[in-house]
Structure formats: C-alpha cells, structure tokens
Image (cartoon, rainbow, N blue to C red):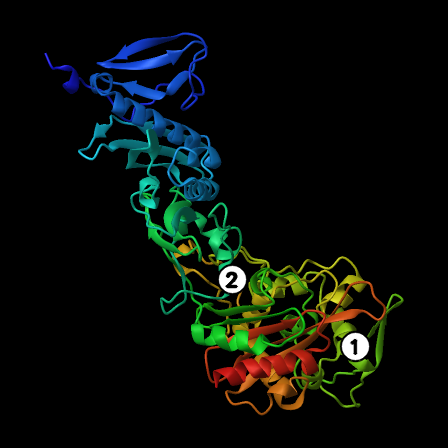
Amino acid sequence: MPNQEDAPYDEGATYRGGRRGRGARGRGSGRRWAFGGLALVVLAGGGYAGYRLLGADDAADPQVTAARERLQGFLGAWEKGQAEQAGTYTDTPAGAKSLIASVMTNLKPSSTEITAGRGERKGDGDVRVPFTVKMRVPGVGSYGWDSEARVRQRSGKWAVEFSTSMVHPKMRPGQTLALTNAARADILDSKGKKLEAASLVGVVDNKSGKGVSGLEAHYDERLSGGKGPSKAVVVADRNSGQAVRTLSAEKSTEGRPVKTTIDPRVQRAAADALAGVKKTAAIVAVDPRNGHILAAANQPGGMNRALEGRYPPGSTFKVVTTAALLDRGVRPADAAPCPKFAHVNGQRFENQNQFVLPEGSTFKDAFAQSCNTYFVGARGKLSDTALRDTAQAFGIGGGWDVGAKTYNGGVPANTSDNDKAGAVIGQGRVEASPLVMASIAATVKNGKFEQPVLVPDAVREKFRAPRDLDPKVAADLRDLMRATVTSGSGHALKDLLGLPHAKTGTAEYGTDNPPRTHAWMIGYQGSSDLAWAVLLEDGGSGGSDAGPVAARFLRNLA
C-alpha cells in the first residue's frame, strides 16, 4: 500500500462548493474532509479556508504551512481581481498591484481559478510553492499556466517575493499579458501579395477578432480557420503595447488565404487617380476577356461603393439604349435631331447646359455629344421591354457569383411613356454600380458579357447572359465610343495613348432644383485588356469632372 506521500491526488484540482474565499479565516467552527491523504479545511457556512490543501508534510513543518497561508492570501486576492489587496501579501506591494491589475484588465477573464500545490522549504529557509492559474478568457477559451512562488520570512513575517516571472514564467520585467487578434490568413492580390485596398479588404473588429466588413467579413470563417479562437494571449511590452510572444495554443484549424484578381499595378493607378479628389468617388477596372476585377478603389474608404453602390448611371446607360436602337434598325449615320428641349406629357427634358446640335447631325453625333433630347425623342422605337431585354445581353440584373458582395444593377420594364423617357437616358428607375458600368464597357470591347470575378476559387458558377450582343451592334458601339473621345464629350482622353473608347454621363438625383448630379465616365482601352468606370458622387459633369480623373488613371498606367 503506498505511503501518504505517494497517495494519488490532483494538485490542480478545484473543489467546488460555491464561491470560495481565498485566505479567509473561519466563521464559526470548521471541519476537515479527507481526500486521498489530504485534508481540506471547510468552514461552517460552506466556505473554504484559503484553499488550504494540508498534507502530512504541512503538519510536520509549520514554517511551510505559514508560508503557504501567506501565498494563499495573495493568490485568492489575485483570483478575485483585487490587485491592491494582492499586493499587501508581497514584498513589493506597488509593483504587484500594478502588474496584477494590468494582467486582469487586459485579459478580462470571465472566471479565474488559482490552485497552490505543496510547498517545500529550502536550505536558506525560504519556501517554494508551485501554483496553477486557470482562466476562461473571452475570444480564447481556456488558458492556464504553471508557476512557482518564493515566500520569504523577514523580521518574523512571511511575504511573497514578487517578480514579473512569478506571475507568469514567460514574462520579463517591463512586460505584461494582453490579448491580440488571433492570426488570420491574408487577403491577397493576383500576385500573391497582401492586399492593402482598405474598402475592399474591410475591417476586423479589435474586440471580437471577427471580420465586420468587406472581404474580411465575407470570408471570416475561412480566414480565421473556422471556429477557432478569435483572440490570442500574448506577452506584451507595457510601454509600447507591442506583442513580443504568443502564449495561447495555436488554433486547431489554420486559416486559408483569399486570393483575389486585383492587379496591384492597376489598383495603385486607380487609388492614385482618386488622391486629392474632394468628392466621394470610385474607380473600377476589369479585364474584358474574363471579367477579372483588376481594381476597386474608393475615396474615401468605408463603403465599397465601387462594387456595391447603387446609382442612376445617367448617359453612360446610353450604351445599352443605343444597343437597343441598333437592334431595331437605327444606323449611326441616320439623322438625329437634337433640340434644346423634349417634352413628354408635361415633363421637360433637356441637354446639359441646354446645348443643341446643328441640323444634319447624325445618331453618331448624338451619341458622342450625349444628346438627351434625341434619345428621349427616339423612345417610340422601343417597346416597354426593349431596354430590359437588351440589358440582359450586358448581364445587368443577373445573379452574379463574383466572390464578394456586389450590386448587379436593375433595368425594369417600362410602365409608362414618362418612365421610358427617363430610362433611355439612364434616369428614373434604372440603377447600376460602378462595377456594372465597367462591365458594360468590357462587354462592348469583348463582344459578349463575361461575368465579373473577384475571388475565382470561390465562384461556383458564373452567370451567363441569356443573350449575346449582335456582332454588328458590338462593332457599331465600339465605333461610337471611340468617336466620343475623338470628337465628343470624352475629349479629356483625346490625347492619351492606348486608343481609349468612352461614354460620359451626368446623372441627376435628389429633389433639389436645379437637381444635383453624379459625374460618370466609362470606357475601355482599344490596345489593351482594360475596361473601367469612374464615378464622382455629386461630382458635376461626366465630361469635365469625371473625365480628368479617368485621364489620370490611364496616364498612371502608361
């Protein structure tokens, strides 16, 4: 039969019977319960006397018993978060108070259990006592560690020798314990480098460690490794707050990075083009061949309006209207009257600054100069469903599987003559995001719709347009968009290399009189695989305001 020293016990065991008072002296009489050769002192009323685990060695050595009782007072106060009280049991009250307060404030444990083991007296008379700390830390779960305290007697009094490493053996003077977000996998650009486009990437909440916006939110489980801890316990420098060592266990499942199609060169060119722009703005660029989103820049950060914004597209939508008219037999060389005003059931439509085109102007001229009154006048050539049906060839309103949250546009069937008059010039109930408008330009360049894609390995099935553009219509649209640059409202791009094709747009919104306007320009490069859209909220005119921003973007890529 084993002797008392070898009797089985759990030094880290916790004996529950309600909240236990550490270091408390008895109220009324006490009694002892035996646990495998140990005696646990139980107070009347259900309390425990300072976690006193008394063994045969304690009874034989009153010095060890006295030292352990002093340590129990320190550990009990620490467990309750009473930093100042804990300090009174040590030889350095101020230092102990400061560090214990720092640890408990930083970790904010929902529960703490600290258990002392048997003590041992050394040759110098000091007593060494091992102890175990167990915590439940929000965002981490269970976290604990083992340490050892040295209790010394000076002038007949016992005191815990305080040191940083006694609180946690991995800490050094000047350090504390803290929480940091658990390591997450990165969001990457097309080259495999960490992506820094703030509005697209999104934000991770510092408290919860979870993604709360952008791709960080969309792929939170993948980036964080599933249901693993969102926080990690670290050793941190008390002055700088910088983590110097991770302590909590690694997550059982590693997070996986999210690789996007963002081209860092194109993204940088877009961001630089928006630098200094006073208006809220966005630029989107896509590859017409495959729909890969090459850039999505927003100014300022926050909402990813480049992909998710909902706006009237104004005259940039005339690309779709023109496709519908070309489908119905209108030719670029056809005569196109462009008066100052057009009236529909008492509603007046006008051109920007009420310009007119001279007699003999053609459909090509009306497109290049963005003549609203011509398009309103041509609405009778279109059925109530013509714009909706033609928009389908550009993928508008489809169920896009991009790998991120997007707004894919809306072009409803017309419900009245006035509704149609607004729709043909991109007003009324027509809405689009900058991504949709960049995709329209890409469709013209490519000849058919390719659904935009941001995270290829997350796309289950790309949306296919229910119909394609007629090749002749696509060819005419390319010619018209080039004319917009060479002889029309896209003159800001006229001197640029790369054969830019474009369409400008000035979209009215709100109820002010005169109405406020968003400025748009969309386009593509004839000599490279790049289509794009520029939006300036409340930005004025497409040609004179959005145009220079588009020009800066394209020059940045030269």
Residue 30, quarter of picture: top left
Residue 388 in the figure: left or right of residue 376 = left
Residue 296 in the figure: left or right of residue 114 = right
Residue 2, quarter of picture: top left
Badge 2: residue crowd in 10 Å (few <14, some 14–19, many ≥20)? many
> Which residue lies most toward the front here?
155
Total marks shown come to 2
Q: Is residue 81 something that shows in the picture? A: no
Residue at the (29%, 43%) spot, across then down? 169
Residue at the (33%, 27%) spot, across then down? 115
User: Sequence-wise, which precedes: disc 1 or disc 2?
Assistant: 2
Q: Secondary structure at mark 1?
A: helix
Q: Nearer the viewer, residue 25 or 250?
A: 25
Residue 200 tag number = 2
Where does the image place residue 525, in percent across and percent down from the top left?
A: 51, 82
What's the CA distance linking mark 1 and mark 2? 38 Å
Please, is residue 64 above or below residue 161 in the view?
above
> Which residue lies most toward the right here?
346
Q: Is residue 426 something that shows in the picture? A: yes
Q: Secondary structure at mark 2?
A: helix
Q: Are marks 1 and 2 in contact (CB under 8 Å)?
A: no
Please, is residue 184 above or below residue 259 in the view?
above
Q: Which residue is mark 1?
A: 373
Where does the image place residue 242, in percent across and percent down from the top left?
A: 41, 56
Where does the image place residue 459, in percent across and percent down from the top left?
A: 43, 56
Q: Amino acid at mark 1?
A: Thr
Q: Amino acid at mark 2?
A: Leu
Q: Nearer the viewer, residue 163 or 466?
A: 163
Where does the image place residue 351, in percent across and percent down from the top left?
A: 79, 78
Residue at the (49%, 60%) spot, across then down? 201
